[in-house]
Image (cartoon, grey):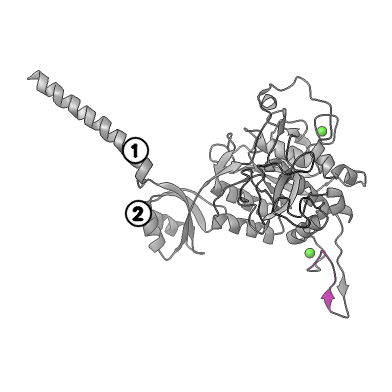
Amino acid sequence: MKRPYFRFVSVFLVAIVVSGFFGFVFAESEEINLPQRKIVVFKDGVSDVEKGRILSAARSVKVHKLRHGDALVAYVDNTSETKLLKNAKVVRVEDDVVVEALEGAADATDKKAKPAATQPVQMLPWGVYRINADRVWTLGETGGGINIGIIDTGISTTHPDLLGNIKGGVSEVAYTSNWNDDNGHGSHVAGVVAALNNTIGVVGGVPAANLYAIKVLDRNGSGYLSDVIDGIDWATANGMQVINLSLGTTTDVRSLHDAVIRAQNAGVVVVAAAGNSGGSVIYPAAYPEAIAVAATDFSNSAPYWSSRGPEVDLAAPGVSIYSTYKGTKYATLSGTSMASPHVAAAAAFVLKRATDTAFDELDNSCVSEFDVNCNGAWDPKEVQAKLEATATDLGTGGQDDIYGYGLVSAYAAFTN
Ligand code: CA
Ligand code: CA
């Protein structure tokens, strides 16, 4: 009687293995109803207790609350989503998609090299030179006092060419409350904006500006959209004047757009990388409230991978850009990630110049070319208009899908 028993057990085991295997195949081809990370947006005024009740009733599991009061992140399956959407207190349920840092081709030897025993002698990176930032320095302006938020992988807390300019930060990622850069991308972007003008390494476009590390991406350079949204809202609440988003997604999510609109309405200039696919401009760059930046190389041509479309506003150096990196290192990277911070620096210069505020008493109207609302301050749309009007036209005449209004010029934006 031992043998049939053994046979029964083996048939049973085979059945488990086979069903497991087919279960996996089934999941791949027909999409099993698994819980996904979603952003659940509630109507204003729904209490946290009530939100919790609504989620439990729909069998959803809350992950965390977003900084902006009416939304939270939860694991929601298809059945739960249907239930949630039937509730009048739920406005919408959106995918909490994965967002990626927009770093393209990299010089792998730089990234993998051990930190040098001594810091290299300071050089002027070609991109900072190309946007004529150094010519603004000769006028005595280096961007002092302007708060620039780097929404990225963090900023190195040990880099001698950045440290003096880092005034604060926040981590929005779940695994750490430390905004130190465990990837390198954010430190690279930060260095393009504001590496120190000293004797070592590189110099950023506005070497006296205040840097804030807003960590939303992990050590692999990816993160959740909800953390990016929280990072934008942190910047809006904490006095950032310019934010740089060298990241994005092809998915248009309303909650991301709303956060960008909140930032702009609060006076924050939003600068974002156009994308590295060579295809359509990604989000948040594609939103009208963000300045979308394409990349150019040493000969002012756009690389094939620089994303394009009517949403491109400006172009800036993004090929073979040498800057600060993880720890105390430096690296040469390419991507619209590297182009965007050149425009962030130029925007800081615009914020430092006087407005052209002028009011016609007879006409009872504003006659300023750039301070269109005559409030004596640079509002984000006015900063963008100044940058576009003073850019150097590239490609086909006038605005085009590859270069937008052209190559940004920090000097022309500050002086013209
Ligand atoms: Ca330096
Ligand atoms: Ca104004």
Could you say which is closer to the camera, residue 76 or residue 306?
A: 306
Q: What residue is pinned by disc 1?
A: 25
Residue annotated with mark 2: 79
Q: Quadrant of residue 286?
A: bottom right
Q: Please identify the residue farthest to the left as the structure is shown.
A: 1
Q: Is residue 3 above or below residue 84?
A: above
Q: Quadrant of residue 109?
A: top right
Q: How many marks?
A: 2
Q: Amino acid at mark 2?
A: Thr
Q: Is mark 2 within 8 Å of ligand 2?
A: no
**Quadrant hosting residue 236:** bottom right
Circle number at residue 259: none
Q: Secondary structure at mark 1?
A: helix
Report the residue at 81% width, 35% height from top.
Answer: 125
Which of 119/368 is in front? 368
* Span colored in magenta: 364-372
Residue 95 percent location from the top left of the image: 48, 51
Q: Position of residue 199 (x, y in %)?
A: 86, 30
Q: Residues within 10 Å of mark 2 (few under 14, many from 20)?
A: some
Q: Is residue 68 visible?
A: no
Residue 245 % position (x, y): 66, 47
Mark positioned earlier in the residue sequence (2 or 1): 1
Q: Quadrant of the C terminus?
A: bottom right
Quadrant (top left, top right, bottom left, bottom right) of the N terminus: top left
Q: Residue at x 85, y 68 (%)?
A: 368
Quick check: is 224 in the magenta stretch? no
Q: Residue furthest bottom?
A: 362
Secondary structure beneath disc 2? Answer: helix
Residue at mark 2 to residue at mark 1: CA–CA distance: 22 Å
Q: What's under tag 1, amino acid-wise? A: Val
Q: What secondary structure characterizes most of the magenta part?
A: loop
